[in-house]
Image (spheres, helix red, strand yellow):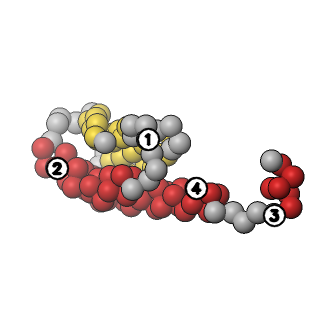
Amino acid sequence: MNLKITFHNMPHSEPLEAHAHQKFTKLAELLAHTNERSPVHAELWLKANKQHEHHATELHIKSSSLDLNAHDEGPDMYIAIDNTMDKMLRQVKKEKERLRDKAHKPDTEKRKFER
């Protein structure tokens, strides 16, 4: 899985890109352990506001079974990237738990009837 980073209203920055890739590695490891057979696409948008010091980040992860979005805003781009990655990490963990619970539901009378 790879991460596509797009810069809006700001020049390309190697340190920002390296920081985003470093933070994305933990998320990529977690996504690698899912039972995902199709490729997972991730895109990170870094948006700077020219009027005042207020930056925004958005992260979108798309696959056949996942479609997750996370975003954050703040005066520091590095903190916004960290917060966005943390939010996405929580969403992925929650989604993995939901899928695991769904697969391990006990047989109830209603489920037997549905078959």
Q: CA distance from mark 1 to mark 3?
A: 29 Å
Which residue does the numbered mark 1 point to in the structure image? 37
Q: Label 3: few (<14), some or many (≥20) within 10 Å?
A: few
Residue 103: % across, % down: 62, 57
Point out the tag, 1 or 2, that comes first from the N-terminus. 2
Badge 1 marks a residue whose secondary structure is loop
Question: In the depicted view, which residue is nearer to us: 102 or 25?
Answer: 102
Q: Secondary structure at mark 3?
A: loop
Q: Earlier in the sequence, mark 3 or mark 4?
A: 4
Q: Give the mark, 1 or 3, whose residue is nearer the N terminus.
A: 1
Please, what is the three-letter code of the amino acid marked with disc 3? Answer: Thr
Task: Residue 103: give its label.
Answer: none
Mark 2, Cα crowd under 10 Å, few <14 / some 14-19 / many 20+, is: few
Left/right placement of residue 17 relative to residue 57 reads left
Q: Identify the disc placed on residue 18.
A: 2
- Please tell me whether mark 4 sits on a helix, a strand or a loop: helix
Location of mark 3 (residue): 108
Mark whose residue sits in front, 1 or 2: 1
Between the C-alphas of marks 3 and 2, the distance is 50 Å
Residue at point 51%, 58% (across, down): 96
Closer to the eye: label 3 or 2: 3
Q: Which circle marks residue 99 in the picture? A: 4
Residues under labels 1 and 2: Cα distance?
A: 28 Å
Where on the picture, by quarter, is residue 36? top left
In this view, the mark in front (2 or 4): 4
**In the image, what residue occupies the spot 53% across and 42% down?**
65
Residue 38: image location, x then y, percent: 43, 37
**Is 111 placed left or right of 2 in the picture?**
right
